[in-house]
Image: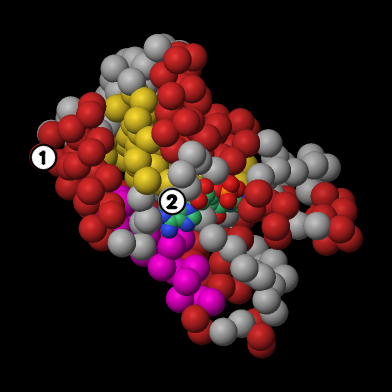
Amino acid sequence: MIAYQKVSGSFDLTGKNAIVVGGAGGIGEATAEMYARKGANVAIVDMKDTCGEIAARLAAQFGVKAIGVRCDVTSQESVDGMLAAVVEAFGGVDILAAMPGFVDLYRATETEISCIEKHININAIGVFRVCKAVANQMIVQGRGGKIVCVTSQADFIAINKHVAYTMSKAALVGMIKVCALEWAEYGINVNGVAPTVVNTYMGEKAWQGKVKTDMIEKIPAHRFAETDEIAAAVLFLSCPESNMITGEDLVVDGGFTIY
Ligand SMILES: NC(=O)c1ccc[n+]([C@@H]2O[C@H](COP(=O)([O-])OP(=O)(O)OC[C@H]3O[C@@H](n4cnc5c(N)ncnc54)[C@H](O)[C@@H]3O)[C@@H](O)[C@H]2O)c1
């Protein structure tokens, strides 16, 4: 059961322990900062070497516990080691934001199977590996939890050259629904946040020049999203305020998928 808890609208996370996978990237770092601002201890988890620096900054700025853990979600050993390090540092896990991401763009006729496998390995199986490990930890703890995965607008609409990315993110939406169904009895919510293009390294990689201006033209809000706007949706789905929402994929797209 996901229990009712009276909420105030403060989105307070004081005393909660959160993991942000992909935490050294654009949306991930913004999410980790928002969690820390709301009082959560935060583990910055990423393949990059900058996890520790980001954690040190958040600890100093917000007075929470923060650690950096280097982890590759395509390796079971790496994910198991990461979770053990977080449990040792914080004593448990209440929130997981999972958003490691990879994109490489080719027209479908030129897309190698190895390219599709790489996308699925990171964006779908890698995310599932972390969700499964953390959910098992939450079940042992017996106090529920929140899992939020960052998906994409590519779940809903066709975008040129995105076949491998879309296959991986659509798989993630299916995973979110099944895990939400199975883990509700343990008080665990599982949701997605599906952004339009966001101004990050990945956003820049996929959208440049005329493709960028054409895309902005099609978004009713007439711009790309900023990282804090996506982090705010992840925060909402990480708080008791959203206890009655599970298995959802919340679109944050300035109206792009209205069409
Ligand atoms: N930027 C966009 O336009 C956009 C749009 C829709 C969805 N998204 C999704 O948002 C999420 C965050 O992306 P971002 O825009 O902040 O991009 P980003 O490239 O800045 O961040 C992605 C992070 O994932 C990490 N990562 C990649 N492979 C990993 C692995 N195997 N193990 C651990 N970490 C790994 C990277 O090191 C990076 O820090 C991704 O899942 C992405 O697919 C982004």
Q: Which residue is mark 2?
A: 47
Q: Main secondary structure of the magenta part?
A: helix
Please tell me whether residue 118 belongs to the stretch shown in magenta. Answer: yes
Q: Quadrant location of the N terminus?
A: top left
SS label for mark 1:
helix
Residue 34: image location, x then y, percent: 50, 24
Determine whether 198 is above or below 146 in the image: below
Which label belongs to residue 140? 1
How far apart in space, not on screen, are marks 1 and 2 (Cα)?
A: 27 Å
Determine whether 235 is above or below 165 in the image: above
Residue at point 18%, 32% (across, down): 88
Dot 2 amino acid type: Met
Dot 1 amino acid type: Val
SS label for mark 2:
loop
Is the distance from the Cβ of mark 2 to the nearest ligand 1 atom less than 8 Å? yes
**Left or right position of 50 against 84:** right
**Left or right position of 137 against 11:** left
Residue 204: image location, x then y, percent: 72, 52
Q: Which residues are magenta?
A: 115-135
Question: Earlier along the polypeptide chain: callout 1 or callout 2?
Answer: 2
For label 1, the crowd category at 10 Å Cα-Cα, with few meaning under 14, some 14 to 19 and many 20 or more, is few
Residue 220: image location, x then y, percent: 80, 44
Residue at point 47%, 31% (across, down): 53
Q: Quadrant location of the C terminus?
A: bottom right
Q: In this orientation, does residue 145 appear?
A: yes
